[in-house]
Image: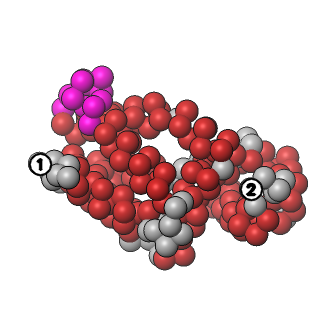
Amino acid sequence: MTELPTGLRERKKAKTRLAIREHAMALFKDQGYDKTTVEQIAAAAEVSPSTFFRYFPSKEEVVLQDDYDALLIAAFHAQQVGVPPLQALRNAISEVFLSMPEGQQAEEADRIRLMTEVPELRARMLAQVSEMIQMLAEAVAERVGRQSDDFEVRTFAGALVGVALGIAASSGDDPGNDYLRQFDRALALLEAGLPV
């Protein structure tokens, strides 16, 4: 689902970045996050450690960097005018995540699971909450014709991020839990006014 760049140089970079991430995730799964070194990841991906660091500033960033934010925001902006923001977001999530091949969905679920299970990754993810809220607030504000610092817009963005974190936090409890479908289910609950 991730769109490949069109130029040869950009395609090579995208392939190298993807290879590094895939080998890292495989090593994390096989021997654990803490026991995996940058040198092992680089060797598995057949690149030098310095090449690794050109793509990812640290081992943590292999997991934390999200390749889908730009695609999700673009899909959100592409929704028809008049579609309420929450429904537009659900549509965008469906287009970007739920339509990706099962293998790619499983990789994304593994990435999310790592972020919630590994303490230093979880701490870094939580430190990025304000950035996530700001990104969503800007997208929603543009859609509804308001400012991103508008109280209602920021509250809405905060609620969305809260839903995402709540689902992520519980996804590690059940290995069969499908994070993306659970997230959509939670957004549907939010859209319905959070009936309990």
Give the side of residue 190 with respect to residue 83, left or right: right
Residue for badge 1? 82
Expressed as whole percent of the image width and height from the top left, the position of residue 109 reads: 52, 64
- Residue at (38%, 71%) from the top-left corner? 99
Give yes or no for contact between labels 1 and 2 (Cβ–Cβ under 8 Å): no
Q: The disc labelled 2 sits on which kind of residue?
A: Tyr
Give the side of residue 7 with respect to residue 170, left or right: right
Assess disc 1: are there few (<14), some (14-19) or many (≥20) residues with their C-alpha within 10 Å of its C-alpha: few
- Residue at (23%, 55%) from the top-left corner? 189
Q: Earlier in the sequence, mark 1 or mark 2?
A: 2
Does the magenta-highlighted stretch encompass residue 154?
A: yes
Label 1 or label 2, whichever lies nearer to me, is: 2
The magenta region covers 145-156
Give the side of residue 8 with respect to residue 100, left or right: right
- Residue at (36%, 66%) from the top-left corner? 181
Residue placed most toward the observer, 56 or 38: 38
Quarter-of-image position of residue 186: bottom left
Quarter-of-image position of residue 156: top left
Q: The disc labelled 1 sits on which kind of residue?
A: Gly
Badge 2 marks a residue whose secondary structure is loop
Does the magenta-highlighted stretch encompass residue 101?
A: no
Residue for badge 2? 33
Expressed as whole percent of the image width and height from the top left, the position of residue 1 reads: 47, 67
Expressed as whole percent of the image width and height from the top left, the position of residue 176 reads: 49, 73
